[in-house]
Amino acid sequence: MFMAALLDVLAPPRCAGCDRPGRVLCETCVEAIDATPTPLISGARAAFPFSSEVRRVLHCGKFRDCRSALRTLAWMGAARLQAPPGSLVTAVPLSRRRAAERGYNQAQVVAQALADFHRLRDAALLTRNRHTQPQSALDRSARRANVAGAFTASSASLGATVWLVDDVLTTGATVAAARQALLGAGAARVEVAALAAVL
Ligand SMILES: [Zn+2]
């Protein structure tokens, strides 16, 4: 905390949404994000559309300001999402390689915010078996094949209602594979939520 405070004095934070100096997520961006409607998608819930501000926060990377901005955004998103009662909140995991490159899992930051906001338990129920290619480089059917069988769910999933969380939903292929692993491990119900959806 001390280091963070010191850094704020030396270099004031910049907004992850618009790059203006001042706050990690400025009031203008917060208002713009808050004004967007919750996307209507089938089979999942997302807090925000993939607006330019949301996209910039999610693409911001691993810098200190970006992580704080992501936490702020995740907290705003949590208020927009209805939690499945009594659920265990679990994030879609990154591969070990991707996690090492990035330093943290954005989906985990979102899952933590959802768990804290809705007073639910956060549980790491999934592991990623292998490194998969970035989904963005692939078309729809290749995306499904790329992530099929990529996840294993722990025995703690048995009988649980699971709130499965990702940062961004695109085709939904990744969460579908993760959901399948959870159901295969005996989860009673799996609901999917994301911070943003690309429509
Ligand atoms: Zn801004």
Image (tube, rainbow, N blue to C red):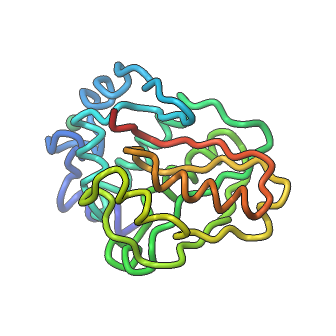
Q: How many discs appear?
A: 0
Give how far across and how far down residue 40 sits, in percent: 46, 24
Say whether residue 1 is visible.
no
- The residue depicted at 27 percent of the width and 33 percent of the height is 51
- The residue depicted at 48 percent of the width and 35 percent of the height is 46
Say whether residue 116 is visible.
yes
Give how far across and how far down residue 163 sits, in percent: 66, 47
Residue 123 figure quarter: bottom right
Left or right position of 122 against 155: left
Quarter of the image that includes the N terminus: bottom left
Give how far across and how far down residue 104 sits, in percent: 42, 68
Q: Outermost residue, left direction?
A: 20
Left or right position of 170 against 90: left
Q: Outermost residue, front direction?
A: 141
In front of the other: 51 or 141: 141
On the rendering, which quadrant does ligand 1 occupy?
top left
- The residue depicted at 73 percent of the width and 52 percent of the height is 88
Please tell me whether residue 35 is drawn above or below residue 196 in the rendered image.
above
Please tell me whether residue 113 is drawn above or below residue 197 in the rendered image.
below
Left or right position of 158 against 145: right
Q: Outermost residue, right direction?
A: 159
Left or right position of 20 against 117: left
Residue 90 figure quarter: bottom right
- The residue depicted at 24 percent of the width and 27 percent of the height is 28
Residue 84 figure quarter: top right
Please tell me whether residue 49 is drawn above or below residue 66 in the rendered image.
above
Give how far across and how far down residue 23 sits, in percent: 27, 43
In front of the other: 125 or 138: 138
Quarter of the image that includes the C terminus: top left
Please tell me whether residue 49 is drawn above or below residue 3 in the rendered image.
above
